[in-house]
Image (spheres, rainbow, N blue to C red):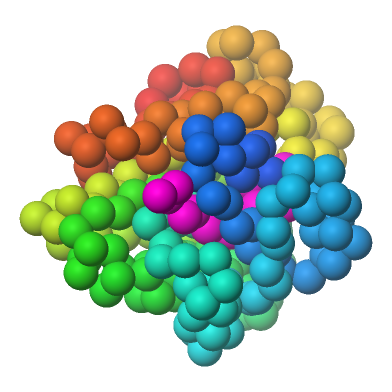
């Protein structure tokens, strides 16, 4: 039977590329999305991949969403915690709401999703969890105390959960993208982005498929000896 995978934020940007890559590996993929119904509808029309809506930052909503997927599609073998938001602002200007929104969605979302699927993976003694971190969680970034803290937290979360899953055939890894050609990066002011790209040794933004390739690698059947690791895909930025 095909493995069942959930990709959060799986209808757009990097998540869309991950959904397609896992589907091309023969998995039955479900793309979660947070609110953009029209993009989700077009995504399903184009790809044949089903899309389910829930807020990954809401614990109860995640429980209900994953239960629905398990009823309608099957037991979940793979999750890719990809969904994330930015609320960029220097600490001086950052509101408590901007801080909370990013922590609750980006980091809380990983906890909520793992809580929903981990017991089943443990009982079946197989699982793949890939969390999408960021170069900005590894190195920090001016204007992103919230985002860098959440992404850095994801790297710690990954290494801790990897230890809890190891005896049960569950691998937990992180992929840390650099600056990728997506709507999120397009929202960075052009002059700021030019300076960032100038510091990327490969000299360009990444493509979503170049991140998806690493995620697919970590989700493969024969990737079972890789756990607690971080795969940095950032064009050489900071050389992590
Ligand atoms: N280092 C030092 N100083 C910096 C700086 C940096 N990296 N970036 C900006 N500054 C300075 C500016 O030069 C300016 O200085 P002056 O006032 O002396 O001219 C000052 O900071 C601007 O400060 P403000 O508080 O007025 O900033 P702002 O409100 O105009 O905007 C910002 C600040 C929101 C941080 C804006 O610069 C920004 O959006 N930066 C990009 C942040 C970024 O890279 N986000 C990544 C999003 S993509 C992503 O996150 C995906 C991923 O995982 C990689």
Left or right of 59: which side holds 123? left
Which residue: 64% across, 57% down?
31
Count of numbered labels shown in the rendering:
0
* Snapshot quadrant of residue 167: bottom left
Q: Tell me residue 224's x, y (percent).
A: 22, 38
Left or right of 13: which side holds 38? right
218 shown above or below 122: above
Magenta stretch in the rendered image? 1-15
240 shown above or below 128: above
Residue 9 located within the stretch drawn in magenta: yes
Which residue: 52% across, 27% down?
213
Which residue: 53% across, 58% down?
6
Residue located farthest toward the top when viewing the structure as drawn: 202
Q: Tell me residue 208's x, y (percent).
A: 66, 32
Which residue: 48% across, 72% down?
70
Residue 5 located within the stretch drawn in magenta: yes
Q: Tell me residue 183's x, y (percent).
A: 80, 44
105 shown above or below 143: below
Q: Nearer the viewer, residue 70 or 105?
A: 70
Left or right of 144: which side holds 123? left
Q: Nearer the viewer, residue 68 or 155?
A: 68
* Snapshot quadrant of residue 20: top right
Left or right of 45: which side holds 118? left
């Amino acid at each position: 039977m095909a493995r069942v995978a959930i990709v959060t934020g799986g209808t757009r940007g990097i998540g869309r590329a991950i959904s397609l890559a896992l589907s091309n590996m023969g998995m039955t993929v479900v793309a979660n999305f947070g609110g953009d119904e029209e993009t989700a509808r077009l995504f399903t029309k184009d790809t044949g991949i089903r899309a389910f809506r829930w807020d990954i930052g809401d614990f109860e909503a995640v429980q209900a969403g994953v239960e629905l997927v398990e009823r309608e599609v099957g037991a979940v073998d793979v999750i890719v915690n990809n969904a994330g938001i930015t609320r960029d602002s220097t600490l001086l200007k950052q509101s408590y709401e901007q801080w909370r929104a990013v922590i609750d969605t980006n980091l809380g979302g990983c906890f909520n999703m793992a809580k929903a699927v981990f017991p089943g993976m443990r009982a079946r003694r197989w699982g793949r969890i890939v969390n999408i971190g960021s170069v900005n969680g590894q190195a920090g970034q001016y204007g992103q105390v919230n985002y860098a803290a959440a992404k850095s937290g994801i790297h710690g979360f990954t290494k801790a959960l990897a230890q809890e899953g190891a005896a049960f055939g569950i691998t937990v890894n992180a992929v840390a993208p650099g600056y990728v050609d997506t709507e999120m990066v397009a929202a960075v002011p052009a002059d700021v982005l030019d300076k960032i790209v100038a510091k990327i040794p490969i000299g360009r933004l990444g493509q979503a498929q170049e991140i998806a390739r690493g995620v697919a690698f970590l989700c493969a059947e024969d990737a079972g000896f890789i756990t607690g690791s971080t795969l940095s895909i950032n064009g050489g930025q900071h050389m992590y």
